[in-house]
C-alpha cells in the first residue's frame, strides 16, 4: 500500500487535511496534537463506481493510501518528528495560504523552509552515519557507503536535496536504507482561504514556479471548507461543491498527485464477486501485474484478457467490445496501461 506522510509548519492545516483524506475526526487546532496519527483511506475512483454499477459486485475494493499526520515542528524538536515519515513512499507538504489566527500567510516562505528542513534532516542523518562508519573498526561494511555518504553530505551542505545528487548504481544502493526525505516523491498542497479558491492569489505564480522546478505536483485545496462540506448529507454535497467551483474533491486531487509523483497507475479486476483496483508502477508487464494478485498467477501465466475502461464506457458492454475487436488477448510482456481491466488465464 502507498504510504504518505503529511508534513508542514504549525497550523498549516495538516490535521484538517488528514481528516478530510481519511474521514478521521478530531485532532484539529493549532498545537492540538502532540502525537502522529496514521490511518488508511480508500482512493475515490469514478472508474470503480462505473464498474460497480455495471457488475453489482458483492465486494468493492478501491485502492488504498495510508496517511500519517505529523504534529507541526516545534522549535528544537522539529526534525525528530520527521523521522516518523522516513519510511513513507511519498511526502505531502502542506502550506498555509489562509490568514486565520496565525496572521498573514507566506506559502512560498513555508515551502522554502520545509524544503530546507528536509535537507537538514537528511544531512544530520548522513553525518551521523559517516561518524559511525569512521568509528567502526569493521571493514565489512559496503565499500560504496563512505564515498556515497561523502558525496551526499557535500550536496546537502550546500542546501541541495538528495534527489539531485548523482550517484552510481552501487552508491545509490548503499544509501537505500537511509530513506532520505529530500529524495522522496513530494506533493505540495496549498491550503487556501475560502475566498481564494479558484481565483489567482498573490503567491500562485511563485509556487507554481518553485514546484515546477522541483517537479513536485502542486494541489490547491481549501481543506477546512471541504471538511465542512464532507459532513453534510451526501445529496447536499454536490451542489455545494459546484457552487464554490470545486470540480474534484481534495482527496481525488491529492491521491492523483501522489500517484503521479510515484509513477503509479491502476488496473482493475472486475466481476460479480469483486471489483478491485490494483496499484502498479507504470511500465509493469502483464506477468508482473498478475504477480500482484498471486505469485501462482504470474508463474502459471498463459494469457491475459484485456480491455480498457475508456472503451467500455464508449461501447457500453463487453459484447460490443468484442465485436469492435477491443477485447484482446495479451502475452506476458504486454505493458499494462492505466485503466486496463485484466483477467489472467493461468495454469499451475
Ligand atoms: N480559514 C481556514 N482555516 C483553516 C483551514 N485549514 C485549517 N484551518 C484552521 O487552522 C487551524 C489549524 O488547523 P490544523 O489542521 O489543526 O493545522 P495543523 O497543521 O495540523 O496544526 P499543528 O498540528 O498544530 O501543526 C484550525 O483552527 C483549522 O480549523 C483553511 O483551509 N482555511
Ligand atoms: Mg495537527
Image (cartoon, rainbow, N blue to C red):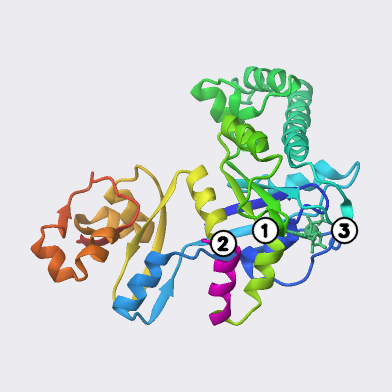
The answer to whether residue 26 is above or below residue 219 is below
Q: Nearer the viewer, residue 259 or 280?
A: 259
| Residue at (8, 64) in percent of width and height | 323
Where is residue 202? Give x, y as percent.
71, 40
Q: Is residue 290 visible?
A: yes
Left/right placement of residue 257 relative to residue 112 reads left
> Quadrant of the rendered structure where residue 341 is?
bottom left
The residue lying furthest to the right in this view is 75
Q: Does any atom of ligand 1 lie closer than 8 Å to the CB of label 3?
A: yes
| Residue at (66, 51) in percent of width and height | 5
Q: Is residue 101 a member of the stretch shown in magenta? A: no
Query: What secondary structure is found at the residue carrying circle 2?
Result: loop
The answer to whether residue 82 is above or below residue 347 is above
Where is residue 7? Give x, y as percent.
72, 48
Q: Does any atom of ligand 1 lie closer than 8 Å to the CB of label 2?
A: no
Location of mark 2 (residue)? 246
Tell me if label 2 and label 1 are in contact, CB under 8 Å.
Answer: yes
Tell me if label 3 and label 2 are in contact, CB under 8 Å.
Answer: no
Query: What secondary structure is found at the residue carrying circle 1?
Result: loop
Location of mark 3 (residue)? 31
The residue lying furthest to the left in this view is 323
Q: Nearer the viewer, mark 3 or mark 2?
A: 2
Q: Nearer the viewer, mark 3 or mark 1?
A: 1
Where is residue 326? Give x, y as percent.
15, 57
Location of mark 1 (residue)? 222
Badge 1 density bin: few <14, some 14–19, many ≥20, Cα 10 Å: many
| Residue at (83, 47) in percent of width and height | 73
The answer to whether residue 170 is above or below residue 96 is above
Q: Is residue 19 visible?
A: no
Q: Which residues are magenta?
A: 235-249
Q: CA distance from mark 3 to mark 1?
A: 20 Å
Amino acid at each position: 500500500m502507498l504510504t504518505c506522510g503529511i508534513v508542514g509548519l504549525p497550523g498549516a492545516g495538516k490535521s484538517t487535511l488528514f481528516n478530510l483524506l481519511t474521514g478521521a475526526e478530531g485532532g484539529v487546532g493549532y498545537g492540538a496534537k502532540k502525537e502522529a496519527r496514521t490511518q488508511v483511506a480508500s482512493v475515490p475512483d469514478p472508474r470503480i463506481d462505473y464498474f460497480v454499477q455495471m457488475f453489482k459486485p458483492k465486494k468493492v475494493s478501491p485502492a488504498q493510501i495510508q496517511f500519517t499526520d505529523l504534529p507541526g515542528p516545534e522549535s528544537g524538536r522539529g526534525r525528530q518528528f520527521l523521522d516518523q515519515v522516513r519510511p513513507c513512499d511519498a511526502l505531502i507538504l502542506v502550506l498555509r495560504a489562509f490568514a486565520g489566527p496565525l496572521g498573514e500567510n507566506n506559502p512560498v516562505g513555508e515551502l522554502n523552509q520545509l524544503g530546507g528542513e528536509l535537507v537538514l534532516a537528511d544531512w544530520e542523518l548522513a553525518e551521523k552515519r559517516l561518524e559511525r562508519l569512521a568509528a567502526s573498526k569493521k571493514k565489512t561494511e559496503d565499500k560504496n557507503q563512505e564515498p556515497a555518504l561523502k558525496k551526499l553530505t557535500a550536496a546537502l551542505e550546500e542546501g541541495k536535496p538528495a534527489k539531485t545528487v548523482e550517484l552510481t548504481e552501487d552508491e545509490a544502493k548503499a544509501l537505500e536504507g537511509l530513506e532520505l526525505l529530500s529524495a522522496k516523491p513530494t506533493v505540495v498542497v496549498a491550503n487556501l482561504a475560502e475566498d481564494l479558491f479558484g481565483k489567482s492569489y498573490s503567491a500562485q505564480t511563485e509556487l507554481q514556479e518553485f514546484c515546477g522546478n522541483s517537479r513536485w505536483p502542486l494541489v490547491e485545496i481549501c481543506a477546512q471548507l471541504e471538511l465542512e462540506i464532507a459532513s453534510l448529507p451526501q445529496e447536499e454535497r454536490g451542489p455545494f461543491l459546484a457552487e464554490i467551483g470545486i470540480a474534484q474533491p481534495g482527496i481525488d486531487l491529492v491521491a492523483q498527485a501522489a500517484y503521479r509523483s510515484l509513477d503509479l497507475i491502476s488496473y482493475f479486476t472486475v466481476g460479480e464477486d469483486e471489483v478491485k483496483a490494483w496499484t502498479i508502477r507504470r511500465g509493469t508487464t502483464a506477468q508482473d501485474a498478475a504477480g500482484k494478485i498471486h505469485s501462482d498467477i504470474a508463474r502459471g501465466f498463459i494469457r491475459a484478457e484485456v480491455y480498457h475502461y475508456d472503451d467500455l464506457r464508449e461501447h457500453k458492454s463487453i459484447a460490443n467490445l468484442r465485436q469492435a475487436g477491443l477485447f484482446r488477448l495479451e502475452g506476458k510482456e504486454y505493458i499494462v496501461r492505466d485503466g486496463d481491466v485484466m483477467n489472467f488465464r493461468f495454469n499451475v
